[in-house]
Image (cartoon, rainbow, N blue to C red):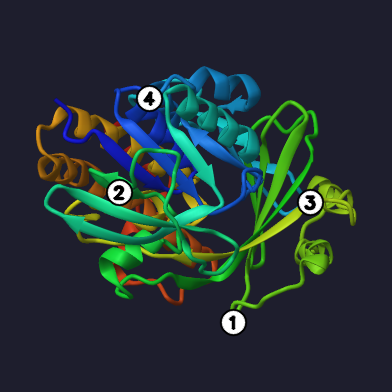
Amino acid sequence: MAAVHRVLIQGGGIGGLTLAAALGQRGIEVDVVEASGPDAVLGVGLSQPNNALTALDEIGVRDACLEVGFPFEPLAIWNPAGVQVAAIPPADGRYGKPSNNAIGRPVYNRILRDAAEKAGARIRTGATVWDMTEDADGVEVELATWTGKRTPPVRDLGADSNRYDLVVGFDGLHSRIREHLFGDRYTPEYTGSACWRITMPRPADLTHIAFAISGPAKAVLTPISDAQMYFGLVTPEPGNPRFDPADFVRLAKERMQGFSGRIGEMRDSITEDSYVSYSPLYHVTVREAWFRGRIAIAGDAAHTAPPHMAQGAAMAVEDAVTLAAALDEQQTLDRALDAWFQRRRDRALFVADMSLALLKQESGGDTLTPDETELLKLGIPGAQARIAQEAY
């Protein structure tokens, strides 16, 4: 018998929807609340490494992702002019081919949402957890309509009650559920860098991810479909400035001036009508148990990773399918949550720590800790090999 029968998930992103599908497929009743509106999908595109694809296969969506995404094998290293100077072959491991699939974020979210709803999950957008009261038998949850500020609680989810056996926060970097559990002990820290992302037509010869560095700027060029790619640019942004979105195109192109050749051509193709997103990069890492009683956090709420290993979303997917399995297999909630945390902790924290170390290294390395310096001895190939060889 499963350890839970009714679960509330705060957060309708990649991790939350994966968990909703995985629980629903096991016959567990699931409600999902997401603060954003129904069409507000943050992000442009991302990579699905083969460990993520394997986890997604557990909820039956691997093939759907491959069908609309762009599978690829090696990672290319380019010079600032866009000439390939090296390649990182895929690490041999337990997860098979393809080693990577890149996909647009909106279509990925739609695939996961369809899977969750097909499994019976109820999804409500524009709502968030307002308050929780826990006792020995469950958690009573008050909800609030989300308008960008706190509003009176909304008590009806379309279900018989707002009482749950478990509440899981897949609610990201600025997690309200994490704040409920830990107060201000784990607050996001700005890394000093930010990421610009632009969707554009894919050149026919861009058939895998390519990385290029020019001074302090790192470009990541990712095909996400037969027709589209995204241009990601990580740059130092001291002081965490706030920019007017109307200036994003101009500011992004200014920061790309160190690139030339084919990368310069991509830069010059960006117009005022191009969609450009800007995201300051933060990190937060919870090293103690990710749960208290009947409330838990997962994904970015527990272990945010900069994009330098392309594994942040993959870790959220792994968190989700392993949590669903633990809740289904264990007889009690305490045992399920503890078994899940013990299974996930080292792997997820390795990705978070390695990703942050890589960001610091590319920013000059002045703030690296001794532990981070030791981690960097693995290099990207060594880190990829560890992920590929370990079971999630």
Can you identify the residue that label 3 sits on? 275
Tell me the kind of residue under disc 1: Gly
- Quarter of the image with the C terminus in it: top left
Crowdedness of circle 1 by 10 Å Cα count: few (<14), some, many (20+)? few
Can you identify the residue that label 4 sits on? 95
Q: CA distance from mark 4 to mark 1?
A: 41 Å
Q: CA distance from mark 2 to mark 1?
A: 35 Å
Tell me the kind of residue under disc 3: Tyr
Q: CA distance from mark 2 to mark 3?
A: 35 Å
Badge 4 or badge 3: first in the primary sequence: 4
Residue 300, percent across and down?
41, 54
Residue 91 visible (yes or no): no
Can you identify the residue that label 1 sits on? 239
Residue 335, percent across and down?
10, 41
Tag 1 and tag 3, C-beta contact below 8 Å: no
SS category of the residue bearing label 3: loop
Q: Nearer the viewer, mark 2 or mark 3?
A: 2
